[in-house]
Image: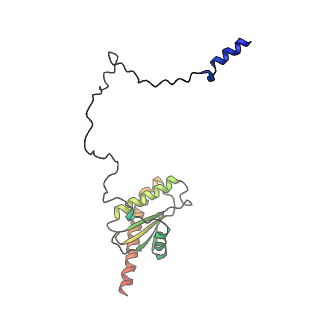
Amino acid sequence: MAGFSNELRQDHETDLSTVYHPPQAHARIQGAHENARRPRRIAFAPRKGARASRRLKRAASPNSFSKASRLVGQNAFAPVFAYKCSVAGKFFQVYARPNLSTGSRLGISVNKRYAPRAVARNSCKRLAREMFRISRNELTGADFIVRARGAVLAASRAEARTEVLDLLRRAWQLCSGGVAAAQNR
């Protein structure tokens, strides 16, 4: 029995050698069995000078939705809601307020109560941004908030697009008409 326990002890990890063996480079044998389709690596001199960036970011297009054209945060939304100039449709409600700049800004509010799934909320937001981008040149000098009143299904997406576009235009006319009347007084 004593010999049996000695055999086990020799195979135990505490009896392993502590000699360090440095890793060796992988030997690749080129020859008759090499893949002929694979291009051979030829040593090129490293490139000198600046290289063009490989970013996926495109240059700002006229239809972009930059940070300057967004209403962000409660402090930006509150004055638009307080102005009480709004129009409503089947899917959306649009609030508008004139601003002193020549550009227009957009805020989007989609409540979980009306669109419980994140996919539906994001779809409503994309639709509102897209329609705002299309009509931005017409809607100058106002801040808008598009608020969802219900989830937009795939079947009613085209109807929702025309509704948002129409509501944005109507809200802008209603809002700018109130400013013109106030200036005439």
The type of colouring in the image is rainbow
Along the line of sight, which residue is nearer the eye, 135 or 107? Answer: 107
Residue drawn at x 38%, y 83% as measured from the top left: 181
Of residues 171 and 154, the one nearer the viewer is 171
Position of the N terminus by quadrant? top right
Give whichever of 6, 46 is nearer the camera: 6
Q: Quadrant of residue 116?
A: bottom right
Q: Is residue 61 above or below residue 10?
A: below
Q: Position of residue 167 (x, y in %)?
A: 41, 67
Residue drawn at the location 46% of the way across and 53% of the way down? 155
The location of residue 49, given as percent across then percent down, is: 25, 44
**Number of numbered markers:** 0
Residue at the image position 40 percent from the left and 79 percent from the top: 178
Residue reaching furthest front?
19
Q: Of all residues shown, which one is farthest toward the bottom? A: 185
Task: Indicate whether 130 appears above or below 184.
Answer: above
150 left or right of 26?
A: right
Please state the horizontal and vertical placement of residue 127, each as a whole percent of the image.
42, 58
Dividing the image into 4 quarters, which one contains the C terminus?
Answer: bottom left
- 56 left or right, relative to 83: left
Tell whether 136 sits left or right of 115: left
Residue drawn at x 36%, y 18% is 29
